[in-house]
Structure formats: structure tokens, C-alpha cells
């Protein structure tokens, strides 16, 4: 059996559709169908599943086409009836888990389909399809998938993906820091604004290394930098730095000679 992460209930998967007004059901159906269908053992049943999925996806892409809507309904119903008939005849001797998952999908029960698919498809593959279906612009899908796989809630993963996507122009070292903070669950708006100041500070490589160490919380360096700030009359900034205020990092780093 495929190794996967902990299975998520249908209600958990439903959060993705609720989180995006642009959720692309056709994309989701096609993508998840491509993961499920090859797992169906019977060649004849697999072929019927492929045909039904193709028709449903075409309907979802052209919802106003009445003929396609009717064909999609009939092909889905035919597949469901076939699976039911096979189940009645075969009993426990023939696995139809994959076919049932596809039936859920074609009938529009996306959460149930994803939950069922997790039994035989890697969860990260399913996650990537759901994230892609959200059709988010300026969005770091890789980070969102990593966070979801690590157990973060969809809302937090989507927000972090948007932040990193929006600030993709930041230097690599800063992107690494913001990604680490997101994975640790410590990425809030205040942190983003503070890190943005570091990005705008146009730090030299040496100054960037200092900023990186300050952001990592090196006590000795923070104390030395605070003393330097105090010596230059920046008492308030020194106090903020000692208290962990990230807004003071850019100023402290710029005091290092280029």
C-alpha cells in the first residue's frame, strides 16, 4: 500500500474550496482523476472510469452546454451502477476502493474523494492538486504544500504562500528565513513588515550575514549590536533589538561597515 500522511476528513479538504472564490473544480476533477484512475485494477472498469472523467471535466469547463451536462450525468450514473453491480457480485474478493473514490469525485463530493484517495495515493500529490485548483496569483505553492504536509491548517498555509509569493523579489537569504518562520508557524503580518524593511535596506553581503544572525537570535551579537546602537544615540532602537523587535534588525545590520 502507498505510504502516506495521516488521512484528513472530508471536511478538512472542503476548506480549500471555501477559501478561494476562483476554485477550479474542472482542474481538481481532472487532476485528482488522473491520480485515481490508473489505480483501478480492472482494465474494463478503468476504461469506463476514464471516459466518464473526460466527459465530466469537459462539462465542468463548459457548464452552459446542456448536451455535455446530460452526458456527464449519464456517464457518471453508469459508472456508479457498474461499481455497485461489481460490488454485489464480488463481495470482499474484489477491491473497489479506487472506483468508489472516483465516483465521489465525479458526483462532486470532492472532500470525500480526496479522503478516499489518501488510502492509495500519496497525500502530497492530492494536496498539490487542491492547492493548484485554488488558482492563486503570486503564490508559493511549494511552501503551501510543505506546510500542509507538516500539519498546518489550510488557512495558515494559504496565507504564508501568498506572503512568500508576493515578496518573491526578496533576496534568497531572506526568503529562506521567512520560509523557516512560516514552517514554524511564526509568520504574522508584523514579522513580514519587519523583514520587508531588511529587504529594502539594500544590505551588503556582510551586512546580510549579520542580519541573518540577528534574526536567528544570537544573543552575543544582539547585545554587541545594541551597544553599538546606544553608542550612536539610538537608545530606543537598542532596546527594541534586545526585546526581539525585528524592525531594529535592518538598522543594526547597516551599522556594519560595507
Image (tube, rainbow, N blue to C red):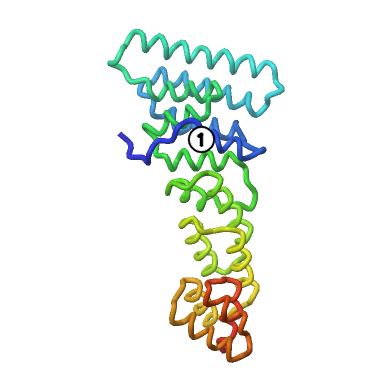
Circle 1: is it few (<14), some (14-19), or many (20+) Cα within 10 Å? many
The quadrant of the picture occupied by the C terminus is bottom right
Q: Position of residue 2 (x, y in %)?
A: 33, 36
Q: Is residue 249 visible?
A: no
Q: Is residue 205 visible?
A: yes
Which is more toward the observer, 73 or 191? Answer: 191
Q: Position of residue 50 (x, y in %)?
A: 49, 24
- Please tell me in which quadrant of the rendered image residue 257 appears: bottom right
Give the residue displayed 65% in from the left and 29% down from the top: 61
Q: Is residue 108 above or below residue 160?
A: above
Which is more toward the observer, 54 or 160? Answer: 160
Give the residue displayed 58% in from the left and 64% down from the top: 191
Q: Is residue 181 above or below residue 51?
A: below
Q: Which residue is mark 1?
A: 13
- Considering every residue shown, the one lying at the far left of the view is 93
The quadrant of the picture occupied by the N terminus is top left
* Left or right: 90, with 116 as reference point: left
Which is more toward the observer, 47 or 166? Answer: 166
* Left or right: 121, with 108 as reference point: left
Q: Position of residue 235 (x, y in %)?
A: 61, 84
Q: Secondary structure at mark 1?
A: helix
Which is more toward the observer, 205 or 86? Answer: 205
Amino acid at each position: 500500500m502507498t505510504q502516506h500522511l495521516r488521512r484528513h476528513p472530508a471536511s478538512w479538504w472542503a476548506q480549500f474550496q471555501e477559501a478561494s472564490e476562483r476554485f477550479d473544480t474542472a482542474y481538481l476533477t481532472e487532476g485528482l482523476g488522473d491520480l485515481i484512475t490508473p489505480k483501478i485494477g480492472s482494465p474494463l472498469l478503468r476504461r469506463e472510469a476514464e471516459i466518464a472523467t473526460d466527459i465530466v471535466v469537459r462539462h465542468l469547463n463548459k457548464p452552459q452546454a446542456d448536451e455535455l451536462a446530460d452526458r456527464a450525468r449519464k456517464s457518471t450514473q453508469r459508472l456508479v451502477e457498474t461499481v455497485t453491480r461489481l460490488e454485489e457480485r464480488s463481495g470482499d474478493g474484489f477491491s473497489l476502493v479506487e472506483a468508489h473514490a472516483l465516483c465521489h469525485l465525479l458526483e462532486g463530493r470532492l472532500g470525500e474523494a480526496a479522503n478516499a484517495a489518501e488510502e492509495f495515493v500519496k497525500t502530497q500529490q492530492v494536496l498539490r492538486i487542491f492547492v493548484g485548483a485554488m488558482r492563486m496569483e503570486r503564490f508559493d505553492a511549494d511552501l503551501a504544500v510543505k506546510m500542509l504536509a507538516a500539519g498546518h491548517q489550510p488557512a495558515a498555509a494559504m496565507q504564508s504562500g501568498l506572503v512568500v509569493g508576493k515578496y518573491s523579489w526578496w533576496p534568497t537569504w531572506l526568503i529562506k528565513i521567512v520560509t523557516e518562520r512560516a514552517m514554524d508557524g511564526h509568520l504574522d503580518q508584523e514579522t513580514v513588515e519587519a523583514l520587508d524593511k531588511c529587504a529594502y535596506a539594500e544590505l551588503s553581503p556582510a551586512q546580510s550575514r549579520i542580519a541573518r544572525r540577528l534574526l536567528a537570535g544570537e544573543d552575543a551579537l544582539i547585545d554587541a549590536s545594541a551597544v553599538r546602537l546606544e553608542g550612536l544615540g539610538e537608545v530606543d532602537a537598542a532596546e527594541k533589538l534586545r526585546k526581539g523587535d525585528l524592525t531594529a534588525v535592518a538598522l543594526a545590520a547597516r551599522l556594519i561597515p560595507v
